[in-house]
C-alpha cells in the first residue's frame, strides 16, 4: 500500500504526527491509594477476624437444610414471577383499554398493591382465616356454594407467600408492561390492522414482541429483586433460604457465618440470573443490533 | 394508460362525516373509484385527505356515512333500519382485502423483510409457507429488492422500506390499494424509486387511491384528481381539467402554491 500512496497520506506520515495521551490528575493516585488501603483492610478482616467462622460457612454451604431452602427460594421466585407476569399483562392491557371500568379497576389494583408494604400483604394473607374462616367458590352474598374449604387449610405458608408476593409483583409488572406496550409506535398497530390481523394477533405477533425489548431489562431487575424479596416469606415460616439459615443459627448461635452462607447463595443465584438476562436481552434486540453482513 | 372499466364502482364512499373532538374533519365527502381507476387526493395539510383514506378501510371509523368495497359495507352491517358496527374480528377480515401503505412505512422492525411479507398471507389467509415465500420473492423482484429478503427494515433506506411496504400490502392480493402520502417521509432523491413502483402498479390495473403532495406525479398517473380542502372535495375530475383549469378559486390558490414549491 505504501508505495502507491502519495507522501503525506500513507503510513509513513503517521509516526511523525504528534500523538495524544490522556491528561493524568495527581488526585488519581490518591484515589487509587485509598481504594487499595480500603480493600486491604477488608481482606485482612475477612481472613483474620475469627467472628466470620469460615469453617462453619464451609460446613453449612451444602447442608441439606440450606439446599432445601435454596430450592424453595428458586421455586417461589419462579411461581411469583409467573403469577406476577400473568397478572401484569392482564392489568396492563386493562389499563390501556378505552373502557372506563376496566381502566379504573386496573388503576385501583396498582394503587392498592403497590401502595401497601409487601410484608404487610404477606402477613395479611397468612392471617386470612381471622376474617374469612372459610374459602368457598359459588354464588356470592349467600348463594349456593360449589366448593368450600377451611381457610386455615387453604392458606399455608406457601400460598400466603405466593399470594402476597404475587399480587404485589403483579402491580409492578403491570407498570413495566404498560410502559413497554406504550413504547411501541402506534403505526405498528395500524399497519397490523390494515393487513387484516385480528386484535389478538396484532397484540401477540406485532406489539408484544416489540414491547419485550423495553420490558425485559426491568423484568430482569424484578426477578433479581424478587429472588431476595422471597426472604420476607421467612416471617410466615416458609422454609426458603433465609428461614433455613435462621432455623440453624437459632439452634447453634452461629449467626454471622450462617448469614454469610445465605448471602453467598443469593450472590451465586443472582450472578447466574444476570447471565441468563444477558442472553434473553440479546434475543429480543433482533432487528436493532448491527447485523451488517445480513443486511448490506 | 390502463383502460378503466365503466361498470359499478369498486370503492364507494357516501356522505362521510367525521369529528375529531370539536373539529369536523370530514363534512359529507363522497367519492367513487371504478375497478382499475387511480385517484389522486391532493390538497393542503389539514384538508382531511388522510382521514378520508383511513375511513375507507375502517382504520378510523366515520361518524356518519357508508363505505362500500366491492359491494360490501366496510366496518358495519345493516340491522333493520340501523347500521351497527361490526366486531373488530370481522372488520379485520374486510381489511385484508384492502391494502394500505403508510407515510412512515410501518414495517415490523423485529421481522426480516421476508417475514414482513409472508406473515399476513400465512396468518390471515392461511397460505402455506412455501407458497407465501414464493409469492414474496416474486413481489420482491417486482419492487426490485430481491437481494433484501433476509435484511431487517432498520438497515434499509427509506425508499427501500417503502417499496417493501408496498410488496407487503400486495402480498394480500388486495382489491384496492390505499397510499397515505407514500413519499412524504422520503428524501427527494428517494421519492422516484417509490413513485416508479406505484406507476408500474397502475399499469397492471390495480385500483388505487393515493394521498400525495406530488402534483406532477398525480398528473402522470391518476385517472382522476380530487382536490380536498376544509373537509370537503373542492374539485374532482380528470387531471387535465382539475390541474390545468381549476374552477374553484381555492383550488387555484392551492395549485399555484404547490407548483411554486415544485419549481423551488
Image: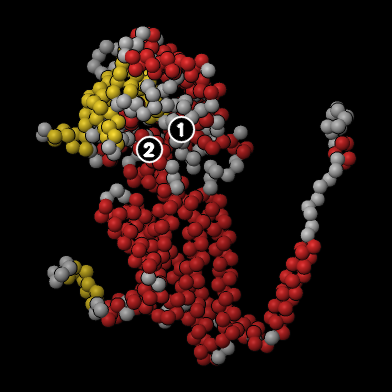
Q: CA distance from mark 2 to mark 1?
A: 11 Å
Q: Nearer the viewer, residue A15 or B167?
A: A15
| Residue A39 appears in view | yes
**Residue underneath mark 2:** A190
Q: At x 39% / y 58%, what residue is drawn?
A: A174
Q: Residue B178, located in which quarter of the rendered image? A: top left
- Give the position of the N terminus of chain A as an image quadrant: top right
Q: How many marks?
A: 2
Where A50 sits versus B53, above or below? below
Q: Residue A234, located in which quarter of the rendered image? A: bottom left
Q: At x 22% / y 69%, what residue is drawn?
A: A137
Colour basis: secondary structure
Q: At x 27% / y 19%, what residue is drawn?
A: B32
State left or right for residue B12 relative to residue B120: left
Q: Secondary structure at mark 1?
A: loop
Which percent across, then down, holds residue A127? 32, 80
Where B264 sits versus A221, above or below? above
Q: Secondary structure at mark 2?
A: helix
Q: At x 27% / y 78%, what residue is drawn?
A: A151
Where B122 sits versus A203, above or below? above
State left or right for residue B131 relative to residue B234: right
Where B145 sits versus A184, above or below? above
Which percent across, then down, holds residue A290? 60, 42
Which percent across, then down, holds residue A269? 55, 69
Which percent across, then down, holds residue A133? 24, 79
Same subunit, labels 2 and 1: the answer reads: no
Chain for disc number 2:
A
Q: Residue furthest left?
A: B80
Residue B105 is tagged as: 1
Amino acid at each position: 500500500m505504501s508505495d502507491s500512496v502519495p507522501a503525506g497520506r500513507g503510513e509513513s506520515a503517521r509516526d511523525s504526527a504528534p500523538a495524544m495521551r490522556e491528561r493524568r490528575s495527581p488526585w488519581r493516585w490518591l484515589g487509587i491509594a485509598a481504594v487499595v488501603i480500603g480493600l486491604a483492610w477488608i481482606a485482612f478482616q475477612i481472613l483474620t477476624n475469627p467472628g466470620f467462622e469460615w469453617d462453619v460457612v464451609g460446613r453449612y454451604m451444602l447442608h441439606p437444610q440450606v439446599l432445601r431452602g435454596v430450592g424453595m427460594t428458586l421455586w417461589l421466585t419462579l411461581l411469583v414471577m409467573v403469577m406476577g407476569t400473568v397478572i401484569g399483562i392482564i392489568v396492563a392491557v386493562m389499563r390501556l383499554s378505552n373502557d372506563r371500568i376496566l381502566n379504573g379497576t386496573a388503576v385501583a389494583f396498582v394503587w392498592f398493591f403497590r401502595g401497601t408494604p409487601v410484608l404487610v400483604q404477606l402477613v395479611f394473607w397468612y392471617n386470612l382465616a381471622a376474617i374469612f374462616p372459610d374459602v368457598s367458590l359459588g354464588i356470592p352474598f349467600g348463594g349456593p356454594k360449589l366448593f368450600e374449604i377451611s381457610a386455615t387449610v387453604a392458606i399455608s405458608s406457601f400460598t400466603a407467600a405466593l399470594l402476597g408476593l404475587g399480587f404485589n409483583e403483579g402491580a409492578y409488572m403491570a407498570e413495566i408492561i404498560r410502559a413497554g406496550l406504550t413504547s411501541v409506535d402506534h403505526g405498528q398497530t395500524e399497519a397490523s390492522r390494515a393487513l387484516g390481523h385480528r386484535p389478538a394477533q396484532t397484540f401477540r405477533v406485532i406489539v408484544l414482541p416489540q414491547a419485550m425489548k423495553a420490558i425485559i431489562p426491568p423484568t430482569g431487575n424484578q426477578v433479581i429483586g424478587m429472588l431476595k424479596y422471597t426472604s420476607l416469606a421467612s416471617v410466615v415460616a416458609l422454609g426458603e433460604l433465609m428461614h433455613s439459615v435462621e432455623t440453624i443459627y437459632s439452634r447453634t448461635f452461629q449467626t454471622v457465618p450462617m448469614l454469610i452462607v445465605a448471602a453467598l447463595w443469593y450472590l451465586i443465584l443472582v450472578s447466574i440470573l444476570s447471565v441468563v438476562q444477558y442472553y434473553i436481552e440479546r434475543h429480543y434486540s433482533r432487528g436493532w443490533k448491527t447485523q451488517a453482513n445480513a443486511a448490506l | 394508460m390502463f383502460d378503466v372499466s365503466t361498470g359499478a364502482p369498486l370503492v364507494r364512499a357516501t356522505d362521510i362525516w367525521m369529528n375529531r373532538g370539536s373539529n369536523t374533519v370530514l363534512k359529507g365527502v363522497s367519492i367513487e373509484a371504478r375497478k382499475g381507476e387511480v385517484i389522486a387526493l391532493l390538497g393542503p395539510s389539514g384538508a382531511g385527505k388522510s382521514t378520508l383514506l383511513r375511513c375507507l378501510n375502517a382504520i378510523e371509523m366515520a361518524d356518519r356515512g357508508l363505505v362500500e368495497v366491492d359491494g360490501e359495507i366496510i366496518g358495519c352491517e345493516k340491522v333493520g333500519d340501523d347500521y351497527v358496527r361490526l366486531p373488530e374480528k370481522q372488520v379485520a377480515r374486510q381489511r385484508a382485502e384492502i391494502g394500505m401503505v403508510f407515510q412512515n412505512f410501518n414495517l415490523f422492525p423485529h421481522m426480516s423483510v421476508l417475514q414482513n411479507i409472508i406473515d399476513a398471507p400465512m396468518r390471515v389467509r392461511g397460505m402455506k409457507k412455501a407458497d407465501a415465500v414464493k409469492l414474496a420473492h416474486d413481489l420482491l423482484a417486482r419492487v426490485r429488492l430481491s437481494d433484501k429478503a433476509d435484511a431487517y427494515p432498520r438497515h434499509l433506506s427509506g425508499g427501500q422500506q417503502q417499496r417493501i411496504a408496498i410488496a407487503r400490502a400486495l402480498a394480500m392480493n388486495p382489491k384496492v390499494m390505499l397510499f397515505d402520502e407514500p413519499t412524504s417521509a422520503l428524501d427527494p432523491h428517494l421519492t422516484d424509486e417509490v413513485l416508479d413502483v406505484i406507476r408500474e402498479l397502475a399499469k397492471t390495473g390495480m385500483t388505487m387511491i393515493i394521498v400525495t403532495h406530488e402534483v406532477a406525479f398525480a398528473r402522470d398517473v391518476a385517472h382522476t384528481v380530487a382536490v380536498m380542502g376544509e373537509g370537503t372535495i373542492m374539485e374532482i375530475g380528470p387531471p387535465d381539467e382539475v390541474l390545468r383549469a381549476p374552477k374553484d378559486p381555492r383550488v387555484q390558490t392551492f395549485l399555484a402554491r404547490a407548483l411554486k414549491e415544485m419549481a423551488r
